[in-house]
Image (cartoon, helix red, strand yellow):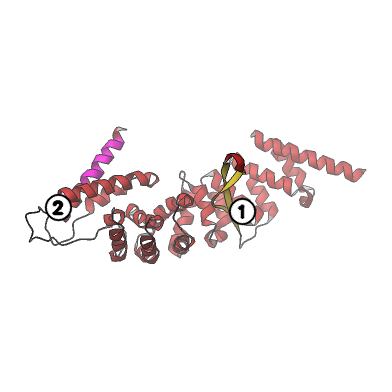
Amino acid sequence: MQQLQTIEDQVISAVQDFANSIRSGSKVVADMSALIDVTDNLPLSSFDYWERLIRSEFSSALRESSTPKWKVWSKPKEFITWLDLISWDGYRREKALRALSGAAPNAFFFSLAVRRLNDWVPQVRKAAREKLPEIAGSTDPDYVVEALSIALSNWNSWGRIEEGDKEVLLQIICEEKIAKSLRSKLISSASGPMPSLFSQLGRTPILDEKMEEIASFAIQPSVRAKAYRSLFEGRIVWMEGRKWEWTDIRYCEGRLKPVVAERKLNVKAPMLELLKKSSEDRSSIVRRVSAEILIRELDSLGSVARTFTERFISDKSRPVSERGEFALKKLDEAERATIS
């Protein structure tokens, strides 16, 4: 709690200093280095909170440092800054998007631009669609990937984002340097919403050629499990969003039902090789997927099916061994049917 308060104080101080320097009367754009340094360390998973805090503090600081009313002849030069992307004024947010050029200074500021795709003003969303590819092209790929990783994991909760807006982000993702960095992040990240990111990246073909590598080497077991399942099934599945479904309209009762979409993979891998690797994986999450596929493919695997079945029966994970026992039951039933 104390650490959070310290970070808040640093953010507020940097925002106030930046606002004061803008209104100081200088004709030179204010130095953002302190603001960049402090936002470098902000967790993007709490972005809503930090965006609200910075917007409020920046707006208050600008009002407090504004030119006195008696200086009617003094009209300080108006600067458009990255913080204007979160201005209370929709016209100013749009103006900021269209005026800013060059690279975003870090992942936080690139996220400010990305989130304008969910802005409540249509003209701001339009400006974001038009300018984001240009900003992304100039920005450090690591910053872009960090921001997109959070955005893609959460965009199903963005109520105003449209298909055209999503297409803009998907086009950015397909840029080779961005795609390469995203694949590396999926494999090397020990924490974070990587399983959700994996599914959303499946909308594009950037993972297809590296799917076996992801299945073998991704640090997070859930990512490896998703990659193996995609290879087994020859498709990749993601959640498109949610839609309301009435369960009892008489009493106005209902629920939000997930809307799922899929895409066929452009690669194929040998079934037996995949089964062998996945059945030996160090995580029971992956081995459970392998056991499920074994049950589904019992008829096509022939005699080798019993070898895998015995391996799963002896597995130390109960969910895996239960699937092995079920597979053995099915094999025994098939043998008895053949004999009779």
Across and down, in percent, residue 128 comes to 37, 62
Task: Decide if residue 326 is on the left or right side of residue 54.
Answer: right
Give the residue type that dot 1 points to.
Ser
Residue sitting nearer the eye, 153 or 270: 153
Q: Is residue 286 above or below residue 185?
A: above
Q: Quadrant of residue 286?
A: top right
Residue that badge 1 annotates: 230
The numbered mark, 2 or 1, whose residue comes first in the sequence reads 2
Label 1 SS: helix
> Within the magenta stretch, is there residue 223?
no
Decide whether the magenta segment is chiefly helix, strand or loop.
helix
Label 2 SS: loop
Mark 2 crowdedness (10 Å alpha carbons): few <14, some 14-19, many ≥20: some
Q: Which residues are magenta?
A: 3-13
Cβ atoms at labels 2 and 1 below 8 Å apart: no
Q: Is residue 316 above or below residue 242?
A: above
> Within the magenta stretch, is there residue 4?
yes
Give the residue type that dot 2 points to.
Ser
Q: Is residue 280 visible?
A: no
Across and down, in percent, residue 127 comes to 36, 64
Residue that badge 2 annotates: 66
